[in-house]
Image (cartoon, helix red, strand yellow):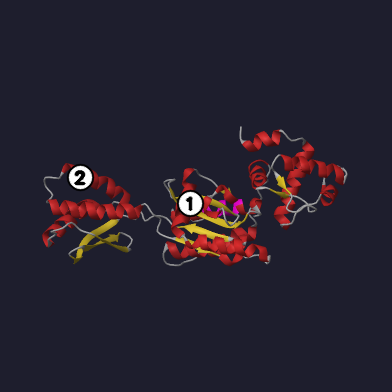
Amino acid sequence: MSDATVLLSEMNDRSREVFRRVVETYLESGDPVGSRTLARSLSEKVSAATVRNVMQDLEFMGLLDSPHVSAGRVPTQAGLRIFVDGLMEVAQVAVADREKIEATLGANEPGVGARLDRVGSVLSAITHGASLVLTPKREAPIRHIEFVSLAADRALVVLVFADGQVENRVFTPPRGQTPSSMREAANFLNSLAEGRTLSELRTHIAREISLRRQELDVLAREMVEGGLALWENAGKQHERLIVRGRANLIDTDADDLDRVRSLFDELERKRDIVEFLDLAESGAGVRIFIGSENKLFSLSGSSLVVSPYMNADRKIIGAVGVIGPTRLNYARIVPIVDYTAQLVGRMLSGQGKG
């Protein structure tokens, strides 16, 4: 039984309704909710004093907080988590929002990156938050591999993919390399590479090297292993993280400016964000990280709604997400992120909107 289920089971109907109304009103307005205002909106006609007593009980449970002595209540981070997990009613994606997202994926920009860039911009615009789009790892089959000597201590490995894309990486070759050892290394790789993706090639090459060590010159084998290690490390990283709409995070409230500046600093540390978004790979579906639940945004008091997307083989290859204040409209944003992730996955699998 989850924490949300346990806590909600300890509440009576009145407490649950008061709690739900406090959270929904706060997420809509951003202001503390008073007992007098709340009493007028409840389905059960009760006095403001009764509502105030219920709110005090919820505060004692750690679900609500009083930002000022005479002010109303706001949900705590724990309260938001309980609401999201146990009481939130997810809305349908509005037709207008759906059409805007679909239009970006139907555009004819050359390359996946340009289309995902548009997805990020639109996702930011319709959610009024900052969007994150983690682009997929390159999994196109390889057409050709070549090593180029740049200096005694530097060499270039050139990968030509079947889709025409070319990627280059510089690495440190073994001492004593010769033109013939470089050709031998390239010939070995090309005899195995064509038609295989990088991940498939890494697995196959490791097996072949162990079987054919006697056939490979020592220098050639070290060139292969050196270049292979480089690509293996690079292959573990996503190609690109697209961040759009950071300006949407700036509220008119001057008290929030320090929080926003802190978040902007965090958004610049793209490597940290990529590592954090990899958490999305631990399970399919939308995940919600509120405030200090994620170390990356703990100082800025922000939340992240993120969902992985998959290719035709149901393998997670990237993620889309929205960052905003903890008082995000979760009920609206969760289905938007989920819908966008599903469309991106179908687009990359060549299935269109389906």
Q: CA distance from mark 2 to mark 1?
A: 35 Å
**Hey, what amino acid is under mark 1?**
Phe
- The image quarter containing residue 246 is bottom right
Q: Residue at x 74, y 56 (%)?
A: 31
Q: Which mark is residue 276?
A: 1
- The dominant secondary structure in magenta is helix
Please say if 269 is above or below 13.
below
Point out the stretch of residues depicted in magenta.
334-341
Residue 87 screen position, x and y as percent: 68, 42
Task: Report helix, strand or loop for mark 2.
Answer: helix
Q: Is residue 336 visible?
A: yes
Q: Is residue 123 visible?
A: no
Q: Residue at x 70, y 43 (%)?
A: 63
Residue 214 screen position, x and y as percent: 11, 45
Residue count near mark 1 (Cα–Cα under 10 Å), binned few <14, some 14–19, many ≥20: few
Q: Is residue 11 left or right of residue 155?
A: right
**Hey, what amino acid is under mark 2?**
Glu
The number of callouts visible is 2
The residue that mark 2 highlights is 208
Depth check: 20 or 202 in front? Answer: 20
Residue 164 screen position, x and y as percent: 32, 63
Please say if 194 is above or below 156.
above
